[in-house]
Image (cartoon, grey):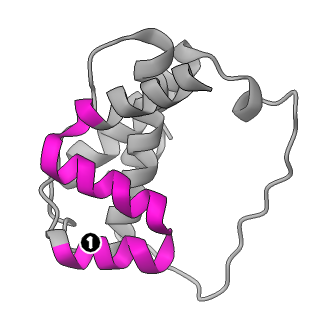
């Protein structure tokens, strides 16, 4: 993630394929499963760099809405594990089209998280997420 913004800024052509080419094998001892607050904060920092680089220009893109919500989940985990300040910048997404996109592609939980985000802000989503873990 730390290299991606540099690659995007220094390329003239980006190509996409209509076939998914990502393959992931779960590793219970891997970094995804064992990352602590510091490792997640580093990952979050890289994602924040990408989001700041696009500077809201992609707010109308359904793919960007889904990506941003994924990064919001990382922000919530960093907040829960470290108690650090919110790093993720707020993006003013078009409400109804974004909500429709999330309902269609990601489900009700992500859509509800988006409603809280839109109405109350990032910190409220993170506090709610932290409360959920405290109840478990």
In the rendered structure, the answer to whether residue 11 lies left or right of residue 86 reads right
Dot 1: what SS? helix
Give above or below for 21 relative to 119.
below
Residue named by callout 1: 98
Q: Residue furthest bottom?
A: 18
Query: Dividing the picture into quarters, in which one does residue 110 lie?
Result: bottom left
Magenta extent: 96-124
Residue 89 is at least partly visible in this image: yes
Question: Does 61 sit above or below residue 128?
Answer: below
* Residue at the extreme front of the image, as rendered: 135
Membership of 122 in magenta stretch:
yes
Q: Main secondary structure of the magenta part?
A: helix
Number of numbered callouts drawn: 1
Q: Quadrant of the C terminus?
A: top right
Q: Residue at x 19, y 65 (%)?
A: 59
Position in image of residue 98 (x %, y %): 26, 71
User: Position of 53 compared to 83: left or right?
Assistant: left
* Residue at horizontal 22 percent and vertical 66 percent from the top: 58
What x and y, as percent, mark residue 70? Answer: 46, 50
């Amino acid at each position: 993630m730390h290299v991606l913004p540099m690659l995007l800024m220094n390329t003239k052509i980006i190509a996409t394929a209509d076939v998914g080419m990502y393959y992931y094998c779960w590793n219970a001892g891997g970094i995804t499963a064992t990352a602590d607050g510091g490792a997640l904060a580093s990952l979050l920092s890289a994602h924040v760099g990408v989001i700041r680089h696009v500077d809201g220009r992609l707010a109308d893109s359904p793919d960007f809405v889904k990506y941003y919500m994924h990064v919001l989940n990382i922000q919530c985990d960093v907040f829960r594990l470290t108690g650090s300040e919110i790093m993720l910048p707020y993006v003013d997404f078009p409400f109804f089209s974004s909500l429709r996109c999330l309902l269609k592609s990601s489900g009700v939980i992500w859509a509800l998280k988006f409603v809280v985000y839109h109405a109350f802000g990032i910190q409220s989503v993170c506090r709610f997420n932290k409360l959920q873990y405290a109840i478990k």
